[in-house]
Amino acid sequence: MNDTTPDIITSAGNAEVKRLRSLHERKFRRQTGWFLAEGMRICTEAVALGWRMHRLAYLASRSNDSQVGALLQALSRDGGRALPVTESLLARVSRKDNPQMVLGAFEQRWRGADEVVPDPTRCWVALDRVRDPGNLGTIMRTADATGARGVILIGDCTDPYSVEAVRASMGAVFNVELAHMSEAEFLAFSAGWPGRIVGTALPASVDYREADYSGPLILLMGNEQAGLTDALMTACSQLVRMPMLGRSDSLNLAVASGLALYEVLRR
Ligand code: SAM
């Protein structure tokens, strides 16, 4: 330990600990523009990708760990604050019994509609009112895995920066671009889109393996309960379906997104 080493925080009443814990709530994520990401690999990758880290809570007993040291260096470059804590406090902040060694608070990034640029080789995934954070995190992970450029959230969606969505994304949240539009904004935006918009919907007659995914592409997926709105279906250049051979009437949204994204990759 040297003079610049911060004191170990042991109290749950500490203002910084309370601030990190508040990031479990959307209201405080909105207010601060921050979000939580857990784990050494994910925090290290986020920093390498240039994401701004505001706080790093870490196990005080691991202060001399070289990976923690590298994160602390990045934190100090960003003007952030180091928070050495006990394991029980780390568990309280992450709300997990077996917390990871580190937990970072990062600055959220949102793209405006003008930054959702057509890219002939990397598609965008648009999600109509996605509600389940596990689905959204899984879709971000699959979008990342298949080289998609980003995810457009349409209407009232779950927060991609919630702890649950970030966890389910396994770090992919740091490697896909995120934009949000109301349905009206997306409809206006889609009218000027120079490429295809392929929607997945149960009423479609075209098999998703037969569709044309060439050129700048938006792959449009519907809400878990209601599917795509009529207006969004109308905005599509093509609607496709995945065969349903058994008694289930539909696939889970994240599974359907995964199938479609891997089909896009084959183009
Ligand atoms: N009851 C909803 C409906 O009528 O569309 C089911 C929604 S489904 C759980 C969620 C989304 O996953 C759908 O809106 C669609 O985008 C996609 N999806 C799921 N199964 C599909 C299938 N067999 N064919 C095409 N899209 C499918």
Image: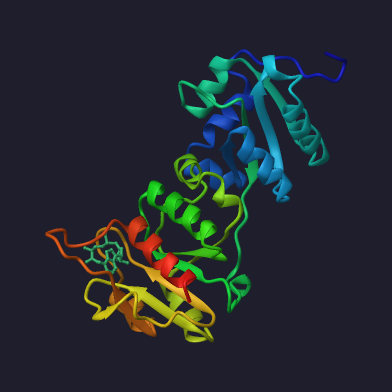
Q: Quadrant of ligand 1?
A: bottom left
In-front residue for pair 188/42: 42
Q: Position of residue 124 (x, y in %)?
A: 51, 69
Against 193, residue 70 (above or below) is above
Name the one closer to the observer, 4 or 238.
238
Q: Position of residue 78 (x, y in %)?
A: 79, 41
**Residue 187 located left or right of residue 13:** left
Residue 68, placed above or below residue 212:
above
Q: Is residue 2 above or below residue 118?
A: above
Q: Position of residue 100 (x, y in %)?
A: 56, 27
**What x and y, as percent, mark residue 210?**
34, 80
Towards the viewer: 239 or 90: 239
In the displayed structure image, the side of residue 232 where residue 180 appears, left or right: right
User: What residue is shown at x 87% (from left), y 15% (from top)?
Assistant: 2
Residue found at the far left of this picture: 247
Residue depicted at 63% across the width and 71% down the height: 115
Q: Is residue 164 visible?
A: yes
In the rendered view, would you say 235 is above or below 124?
A: below
- The answer to whether residue 12 shows anywhere in this view is no
